[in-house]
């Protein structure tokens, strides 16, 4: 059981926490208290919900890996509320990193920077860089401001499954392993942060995410996108089979699928318009107005919804390869990947 430590005598906590299922609430004080005591909890961010713990507390960080069932070679992002606080953990801040931080923090951007000895190796899986981000969600910002340590937080889903964009998603999947989920409403961006690293003067995007490449390039010029490689990934979030629902996902060949399965067995995730020949109740339109940002916001809730329907397969329509469409397509391709 995830938080048996509670039963061993943290009497200051309300008794109801000992019931076995995470409480969903908006009490920042409660969240703070639990984090200070070394617990791991769900927190909202503008991208997706995070599974947060004190990044400087090895027991808390270990617990994050356990709760998520995440391999220890997959490093965590360190979240903080200010550049000043981050300074303790980062050895070097290249000019391009400063420009990006200034333009997009707080926000859905994670920077890979050389780390200081203050960051436990467990957090970075022994790498000499640390991933850092200042989230913009008001609740997580306030929480981080009040804490005197940073939060290590991966997305609050079991390893390999779809990221959560609502408190209820976290509760459904990890609720029996954590005491509390801070509810900040549905995540506004809906997909994870863009991850950028630096080599010499070059900016390299390792994960497409909430800030579109075109927008990054307005600030730092041309960037190199390495987010599509699947062999020997620098970030395991780059592994092909990731972000996957339990049902098989297909991103092409709806006609063939319809020859193999009756229409009521197919769930469909259209971008803007319903597909003919499939029951309307089996379809989740991402953005009727054709916005890639709205589609990103709806993506994981849509996949989750279809995964929960009595269908055998999910067909997802790729978005135009621009703006957040690239990041959405990246996730759909990984969800459809079989290796
Ligand atoms: O939007 C987000 O980034 C969310 C919210 C909660 O902040 N977090 C998130 O964390 O997506 P996670 O753990 O699900 O994905 C972080 C990715 C992983 O693929 C990890 O391998 C990569 O970041 N990463 C972390 N530290 C790294 C490092 N030092 N070098 C390379 N990749 C790193
Ligand atoms: Mg994740």
Image (cartoon, helix red, strand yellow):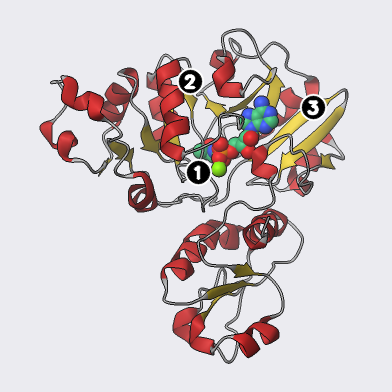
Name the residue: 70% across, 46% down: 208
Q: Residue furthest top?
A: 117
Crowding near pointer 1: few (<14 within 10 Å), some, many (20+)? many
Q: Which one is closest to the eye, mark 2 or mark 1?
A: 2
Asked if 314 appears above or below 63 in the picture, the reply is below
Residue 205 percent coordinates (x, y): 76, 39
Label 1 element class:
loop
> Label 2 vs label 1: CA separation?
20 Å
Is residue 160 positioned above or below 274 on the image? above
Furthest toward the bottom, the residue is 277
The tag earlier along the polypeptide, 2 or 1, is 1
Q: Are marks 3 and 2 in contact (CB under 8 Å)?
A: no
Q: What residue sits right under mark 2 in the picture?
A: 55
Rendering coords of residue 292 (x, y %):
65, 61
Q: Nearer the viewer, residue 11 or 298?
A: 11
Residue 76: quarter of image: top right
> What residue is pinned by disc 1?
46
Q: Residue at x 29, y 25 (%)?
A: 34
Q: Earlier in the sequence, mark 3 or mark 1?
A: 1
Q: Quadrant of the C terminus?
A: bottom right
């Amino acid at each position: 059981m995830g938080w048996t430590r509670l039963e061993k005598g943290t009497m200051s906590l309300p008794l109801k926490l000992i019931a076995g299922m995470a409480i969903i609430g908006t009490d920042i004080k409660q969240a703070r208290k639990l984090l200070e005591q070394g617990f791991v909890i769900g927190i909202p961010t503008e991208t997706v919900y995070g599974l947060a713990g004190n990044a400087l507390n090895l027991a808390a960080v270990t617990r994050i890996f356990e709760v998520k069932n995440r391999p220890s070679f997959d490093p965590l992002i360190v979240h903080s509320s200010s550049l000043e606080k981050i300074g303790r953990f980062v050895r070097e801040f290249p000019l391009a990193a400063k420009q990006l931080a200034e333009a997009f923090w707080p926000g859905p951007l994670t920077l890979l920077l050389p780390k200081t000895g203050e960051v436990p190796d467990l957090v970075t899986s022994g790498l000499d860089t640390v991933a850092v981000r200042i989230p913009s969600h008001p609740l997580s910002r306030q929480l981080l401001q009040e804490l005197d340590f940073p939060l290590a937080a991966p997305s609050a889903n079991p390893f390999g499954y779809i990221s959560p964009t609502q408190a209820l998603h976290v509760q459904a999947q990890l609720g029996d392993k954590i005491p509390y989920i801070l509810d900040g409403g549905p995540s506004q961006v809906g997909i994870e942060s863009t991850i950028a690293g630096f080599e010499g003067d070059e900016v390299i995007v390792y994960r497409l995410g909430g800030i579109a490449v075109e927008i990054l390039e307005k600030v730092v010029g041309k960037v190199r996108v390495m987010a599509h490689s699947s062999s020997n990934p620098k970030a395991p979030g780059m592994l092909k089979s990731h972000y996957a629902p339990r049902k098989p996902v297909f991103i092409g060949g709806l006609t063939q699928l319809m020859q193999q399965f009756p229409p009521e067995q197919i769930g469909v995730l259209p971008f803007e318009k319903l597909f003919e020949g499939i029951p309307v109740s089996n379809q989740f339109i991402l953005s009727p107005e054709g916005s890639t940002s709205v589609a990103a916001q709806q993506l994981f809730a849509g996949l989750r919804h279809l995964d929960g329907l009595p269908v055998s397969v999910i067909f997802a329509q790729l978005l135009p390869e621009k703006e957040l469409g690239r990041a959405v397509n990246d996730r759909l391709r990984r969800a459809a990947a079989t290796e």
